[in-house]
Image: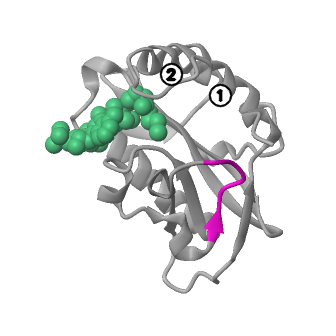
Amino acid sequence: MTIRAEQPADYDSIYLVVKNAFETAEQSDGNEHNLVNSLRQSNAFIPELSLVCEINGQIVGHIMFTKLQISGHTGLALAPLSVLPQYQRQGIGTSLILEGHKIAQTLGYSYSVVLGSEKYYPRIGYLPAETFDIRPCFEVPGKNFMAYKLYENAPLISGIVKYAEEFGIT
Ligand SMILES: CC(C)(COP(=O)(O)OP(=O)(O)OC[C@H]1O[C@@H](n2cnc3c(N)ncnc32)[C@H](O)[C@@H]1OP(=O)(O)O)[C@@H](O)C(=O)NCCC(=O)NCCS
């Protein structure tokens, strides 16, 4: 298994991986594959943090972290995360997140924020974002809005998150 930054030649495969992964997802708006393409064109895009997982030359997973604002501080939004159905439950999603965290740390980001399953992300250390006084800009159960502190001495940044406008969250 290889995890590496995406390249332009991967864009079509990534589109299909994201589409395919979310077709059977518990939560989906059916648009995640298009969201990836729009985020790539946005100011929130971080090329080093759009990663693919490759097995025998085939892209089987993808993760994107983009910039989000918290009280004037730049954090990260983890979204979307996709693993092809036939490759799920083999640790690929976890490996993509952990590699993303490592790169994010070297780039100096302090928090990653995710909206997702309370059964999945806490296994990797995500806590309800309210633990850090990071708050959503929409109605969501607290357990599904989570954050991860990327380094020990990260400053406390209280505030409401502002996603890239491509997410369509106002
Ligand atoms: C969610 C997803 C990325 C997980 O990737 P993965 O490579 O299968 O995950 P891992 O192998 O690293 O972790 C597997 C563990 O996570 C948990 N898990 C996996 N998918 C889960 C889900 N959809 N909800 C809750 N827990 C989940 C299980 O506990 C599993 O452990 P187990 O096999 O011992 O029961 C993948 O299922 C996927 O692409 N789903 C469709 C798209 C999606 O929902 N993305 C997340 C949006 S927040």
Q: Residue furthest left?
A: 90
Viewer-side residue, 132 vs 8: 132
Kindly state the secondary structure of the residue where label 2 is placed. Answer: helix
Q: Position of residue 165 (x, y in %)?
A: 82, 39
Viewer-side residue, 121 vs 16: 121
Q: Quadrant of ligand 1?
A: top left
Residue located beneath label 1 in the image: 36
Residue 98 shows up from this direction: yes
- Taking the magenta stretch, the answer to whether it contains residue 84 is no
Give, as a three-letter code, the residue at label 2: Val
Residue located beneath label 2 in the image: 18
Judged left or right of residue 81, residue 42 is right
Name which residue lies at 61% across and 29% down.
Answer: 7
Residue 31 falls in which quadrant of the image? top right
Q: Reading the chain from its start, which is encountered first: label 2 or label 1?
A: 2
Q: Are marks 2 and 1 in contact (CB under 8 Å)?
A: yes
CA gap between label 2 and label 1 equals: 8 Å
Q: Position of residue 84 (x, y in %)?
A: 36, 21
Q: Which residues are magenta?
A: 134-139
Q: How many marks?
A: 2
Q: Position of residue 154 (x, y in %)?
A: 59, 81
Residue 169 falls in which quadrant of the image? top right
